[in-house]
Amino acid sequence: MELTFVWMPLALGGALATALAVFVILRRGRRAGERGTLAAAHADRLFRLPAYRWAFWRALAGLALLLVAVGTTITALTVIASRPVSAAVRDTELDNRDIVLCLDVSGSMAGEDAKVLGYFAQLAERFRGERIALVLWDANPVTVFPLTDDYPYIERALGELQAASDLIPGNGQEGDQPPLYAGTEIGGGSSKVGDGLASCVLSFDHGDDERSRTVVLGTDNESFDDSLLTLTEAVDLAVENDVRVYGLAPFPSTAAADMDDELRRTDGQVFGLGDLGGAQVIIDAVLSDQAATLDGVPQLAIRDEPGGWLLLAILGLWGVAAAVWVVRT
């Protein structure tokens, strides 16, 4: 056990020492000022009376009990106020799989982003323990959050993005581009599918570890500008890094069919946003992979432990009450 505020017991000891010194000084001063004492004859006869003797010793015991109870209570409360704690360093391990949510925020997806984000949120609700990241891309990829297992944050970020996506022209409301999408237009061009998928594939860390890695790609596969990488080359990169890629297409099209052919090379496939079973297929496929263990960051665990001192303080207060009753009666 350690005390958080070590100075409090020292302060109590100093206060008691000061009070004792003042009492002794005042006591000596009063005795020095006394001119004499008044003697009472035959006072010892009082102690021969059983009732007096019983009352005397009862009062003396009450005062002693009061002194002990007050001292115990003050000491226990001082220790509690000093906040006794126990500290221990815990080694943590993350036993999970990695998932990157990869969203095309180009103009052709403006009316569908909210739906895809809702799909992503549905997936995040079903996972627990897996690390999840979110990357947005158009001409340029932007990482909203890296791989993390902070699910309250993940759900909050996805909810904010889904609300912000309603402000994009094409979703039924007019407005400026939300700041959460800022940066995806850097570099010029639009809807660079190959570059977007490649950036998501490269978002995984611990590349030397054998881990389950999955990308969920939301795009219509409509590319209007030349990318550094084609979709085929990006899928080759995913295969090389042992990354499974699932696609979410907002509507059936030739481009979506072509993307499905490519993603099947990673053991993935393309689902429509209206395919309610698609989410379960993705979840089952991810959870069927063997989770790998990753060393976590050591954590300092601090726990308050006032238990015994709190009980002692309560008993001390009861002792004070009992002592006061004894002295008064």
Image: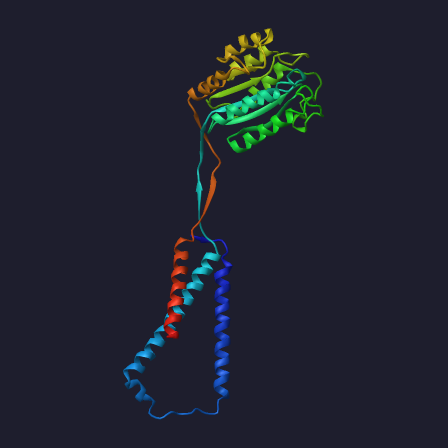
Q: How is the image coloured?
A: rainbow
Q: Is residue 35 above or below residue 256?
A: below
Q: Position of residue 52 (x, y in %)?
A: 32, 82
Q: Position of residue 37 (x, y in %)?
A: 43, 91
Q: Position of residue 153 (x, y in %)?
A: 55, 33
Name the one closer to the observer, 253 or 197. Answer: 253
Q: Is residue 184 above or below residue 324?
A: above
Q: Is residue 206 visible?
A: no
Q: Quadrant of residue 288?
A: top left
Quarter containing the C terminus: bottom left
Q: Is residue 170 visible?
A: yes
245 horizontally vs 142: left or right: left
Name the one closer to the observer, 248 or 290. Answer: 248
Q: Is residue 59 above or below residue 233?
A: below
236 horizontally vs 95: left or right: right
Name the one closer to the observer, 185 or 284. Answer: 284
Q: What residue is rendered at 38% in x and 71% in y?
A: 325
Q: Position of residue 140 (x, y in %)?
A: 66, 21
Q: What residue is rendered at 36% in x and 72% in y?
A: 326
For this orientation, the residue located farthest to the top is 254
Q: Is residue 254 above or below residue 11?
A: above
